[in-house]
Image (spheres, grey):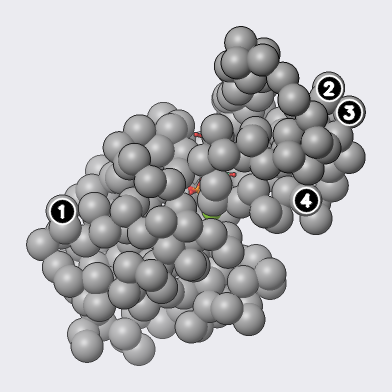
Amino acid sequence: MKIKGLLFDLDGVIVTTEHNHFVAWKRTADELGVPFTERENEQLKGISRIDSLKMILKMGNVFISESEFDALLKSKNDFYLESIQELNQSDLLPGVMDLLLKAKAQGIKLGVGSSSKNANFILGLLGIADFFDVVVDGNGVSDPKPHPEVFLNGAKAFGFLPAECIVFEDATSGIQAAKTGGFLDIGVGNPEVKEIATNYYNDLTEFRLEDYA
Ligand code: B16
Ligand code: MG
């Protein structure tokens, strides 16, 4: 089926902010005394903020009060936001800008499907918000990835069937969400998803729009 819409995950596909999330969660895990490396962080990619903290607590078998939970969520996000203050267009991952320009010129619809509640803020810093016909983020979904809601809402806003859209993802949870939703799932920039993704590219410079649309 000819592709009519592209749905991009944000952190890890459009921009390198996954590392900032890792550093911020590492700080939280250290505070809680939970061992946390890139390996544990892999399970958090694409997962909502609340689910990420729940997962860290589970990893360490740590129990905290509701108010401590809320305070940790806030301090993680404050630290994360502080660390991305300088973000700008030069932080776009390779191939992103060229693909956005090419797809737009061909009349293909563009959307973001992110678990992040900071998605619109980040798109603003990157100066690419105007490219997108729809942005579905962590503020607008009730079931976070790996549930497909975030991408289904995007396809619905386009007015297209999921099978007419590609989802670009760097996280296992996001690839699962795309598959469950009936999208063509393409893994990008994270060898961890190579095995499960229908197609995989090291970065978006390797993706050829003419092969799909
Ligand atoms: P926030 P994506 C996800 O964004 C990140 O992969 C994940 O690491 C992060 O915890 C989640 O957003 C929530 O982000 O704390 O900014 O709301 O990859 O789905 O674009
Ligand atoms: Mg991601």
Crowd class of label 4 (few under 14; some 14 to 19; many from 20; radius 10 Å): some
Q: Does residue 8 appear in this view? A: no
Q: Are marks 3 and 2 in contact (CB under 8 Å)?
A: yes
Displayed quadrant of residue 49? top right
Where's residue 58, x and y in %?
A: 73, 40
Residue name at image x 34 percent, y 40 percent: 142
Residue under circle 2?
31
Task: Tell me the amino acid under the disc marked 4.
Answer: Glu
- Residue 157, label in figure: 1
Residue at disc 4, secondary structure: helix
Mark 1 Cβ inside 8 Å of ligand 1: no
Where's residue 149, x and y in %?
A: 32, 53
Residue under circle 3?
33
Residue name at image x 48 percent, y 67 percent: 176
Task: Tell me the amino acid under the disc marked 3.
Answer: Gly
Crowd class of label 3 (few under 14; some 14 to 19; many from 20; radius 10 Å): few
Q: Is residue 75 left or right of residue 33?
A: left
Residue in the foreground of this view, choosing between 210 and 71: 71
CA separation, marks 1 and 3? 43 Å
